[in-house]
Amino acid sequence: MPRRVMSIQELRRALAAKEREAQKLQRQRTKLADRLDVIDGKLEVLGSVVDIGAAKKRGRPKATRRRRRRARGGSLVQYISRALAKAPEPVRVKNIMKAVQAAGYKSSSKDFYSLVAAALRDTDQFKRTGRGLYTLKK
């Protein structure tokens, strides 16, 4: 049995109905989350243990993406260049990483070493002089 083809107007009406239903459910969800927050507060006052993991899971959904924080004082490549400029001889990636962090570069990366190594490898400013050793190009 072939499916019936819907017109553009029928599709728009169906979409509008779904959007209204989604908005209604979102309002209900927000009200329930507020009520649960009040109950959690009362439980805390009474000294009862509140399951914080569950409280966070049911929290309001984030409407926007998390914003990426910019480094102050320049990019990672600039920090690496400054660190290598101070070094009289080739430096290991691990030592470059420590120098960059000591200079104030902030990173929340779990594998910051890989970021530094990739920047050294992919940027033309740096010259690989040996295994794991880098210096500035002259």
Image (cartoon, grey):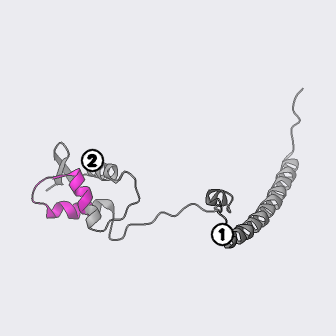
Indicate the position of residue 68 as horizontal and vertical percent values.
48, 63
Q: Quadrant of the C terminus?
A: bottom left
Left or right: residue 133 versus residue 1 is left
Q: Which mark is residue 85?
A: none
Q: Under tag 2, what secondary structure? A: helix
- The amino acid sitting under disc 2 is Arg
Residue 88: in magenta span = yes
Residue for point 33% across, 49% down: 114
Q: Is residue 119 above or below residue 73?
A: above
- Residue to which mark 1 is pinned: 47
Q: Which mark is residue 121?
A: 2
Left or right: residue 88 versus residue 32 is left
Q: Which residues are magenta?
A: 79-99
What residue occupies the far top of the structure in this picture?
1
Q: Main secondary structure of the magenta part?
A: helix
Residue 76: in magenta span = no
Report whether residue 125 is seen: no
Q: Nearer the viewer, residue 46 or 18?
A: 46
Residue for point 36% across, 70% down: 72
Q: Quadrant of residue 26?
A: bottom right
| Mark nearer the N terminus (2 vs 1) | 1
Indicate the position of residue 117 as horizontal and vertical percent values.
28, 49
Q: Is residue 4 above or below residue 82?
A: above
Alpha-carbon distance for marks 2 and 1? 56 Å
Indicate the position of residue 87 as horizontal and vertical percent values.
13, 60
Label 2: how many Cα within 10 Å (few below 14, some 14–19, many 20+) = some
